[in-house]
Amino acid sequence: MTLALLVSMVLLFGLPGIFLVVWRATRPPFGIASFRWLYVAWACLLVAASVWSISRVPRYSVDQMGTDNLVRLAFLALGVFLILALSSRYRFALSSELGAGALGVFFLFSLWATATTLWSVSPAGTLYKSVEYGAMLVLIALAASLINLSLEDPHKRSMALKKLFDFNWLLLFLLTASVYLGILLWPEYAIMRDYRSTTGILGFSIQGVLPGISANGVGQLGALMGVVAFARLLLGSGSRLLYVPIFVLSLITMVITQSRSPILAFAVGVMAVLIVSRRFALLAAAGALLGAVMATQYSELAYEFMRRGQSDESITNLTGRATYWEVSLQAVQERLLEGYGAYAGGRYVLASALGDSVSTVHSLWIEILLDTGLVGLTLFSTALAVTWFWLFKLRSHAMRTPTNRLLWFECLGVMAVLSVRSVFSVSTFAWSWYVVFFGVVLVFIGVMRRQIVKPEYAGALLAQPLPAARRRGPGIRR
């Protein structure tokens, strides 16, 4: 009876409120309807990359696909269709974005990942995840080119960027909200009391049910949402009251997942924002407060929370990660140049050496080396280095306007969180729905870079969509 009442309240009050928020967040900037279709494609790829099954048993073959993966495939197909329709409307001008800058190197990396299908230990899985990843990168290029082509005024471009960021963070918030909704509807799946060999002070952890999100993944959601909320509280203009409860919710989420690396990533992100924004007084005050707390009896409580009941040996071994990495580095020597296949090598190597109970190497860098070899690792490292290079190169230009300044610091915080997490997790910059959240950083760089480099981006004809008589097929109107 209580559950039925709760569901009724959600349907009566929650869904209309969510609908109004989503409708407002997806309102196209300056009346350009193509942006709304861009948002739909953005959401479709996020859904396609998510896990829609309560079961957490790894599946490695086409025969084990299941209905949930067919749904994911349908959303991926819909997203690709919308991307192609929008791209054809603008004569595939996005190709200039895919051939330059950080996004160009990431796209080259995705092509190499797709090529590894030819020798992959799991060709179907490699092909699907490579196509999914490539579609995300094309969508990111489409977003940047759409802003550059549709809007000439730099101020309007900044407003369009801000709308895209707002929509992206709305999706992030909805994913976090789905975790707590899962606690209410499926507590037996969402609340885990035997997830780890030791549970620490709290005695439990939480995970997302539908979509399926691991405890560390939920903590990473909290870290991303927290650093964005912190940036907006610190640097945003107008009313900031909305971001106080979001920031508090982010902290609570990280605590009850008991995930240490997301907490570390969040701390690094906040410190990066404070240091680069030169808020040294606030940084010193936070350090002093932390030092004061650690000088009390609560320091032992904090230590035991971070220790999570583990032995010194387990902590030294990074909760088994050191073993996974050692096994992986030994196995990669057999295929050092080409790897075992994108999104397949890590699972194959660990399953062969340690059994089916381990499905991830818990490090994106090791995963990429295993999956795509030295070639892929070199391309990925270059792409990430170029991203950081352009982000700081654009800093002085972004500081000229309040909107660009805020978005730049949000990019800095997100990059810091994902960079730290990439050492301990595979779900950050590649083959994951987190690529969608990272994508706004690449869109920001793509739009801002055009303003300072000012190449011959597109001719006058490309700056306008195709005539109506030539674009009736997709049914997308401006």
Image (cartoon, helix red, strand yellow):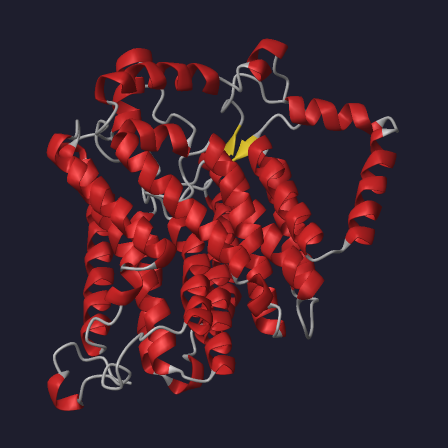
**Corner quadrant of residue 385:** top left
**Corner quadrant of residue 117:** top left
For the C terminus, which image quadrant?
A: bottom left
Q: Nearer the viewer, residue 267 or 219?
A: 267
- Residue at x-position 20% and y-position 50%: 73
- Residue at x-position 56% and y-position 33%: 261
- Residue at x-position 62% and y-position 11%: 311
Q: Nearer the viewer, residue 71 or 42?
A: 42
Q: Nearer the viewer, residue 231 or 109?
A: 109
| Relative vertical location of residue 153 with respect to residue 147 in this rendering, above or below | below
| Relative vertical location of residue 19 with respect to residue 287 in this rendering, above or below | below
Q: Is residue 465 visible?
A: yes
| Relative vertical location of residue 88 with respect to residue 191 in this rendering, above or below | below
Q: Position of residue 384 (x, y in %)?
A: 42, 46
- Residue at x-position 87% and y-position 35%: 292
Q: Is residue 69 visible?
A: no
Q: Position of residue 435 (x, y in %)?
A: 38, 50
Q: Position of residue 16 (x, y in %)?
A: 48, 71
| Relative vertical location of residue 377 with respect to residue 211 in this rendering, above or below | above
Q: Position of residue 325 (x, y in %)?
A: 41, 19
- Total labels: the figure holds 0
* Side of 437 where 193 appears, left or right: right
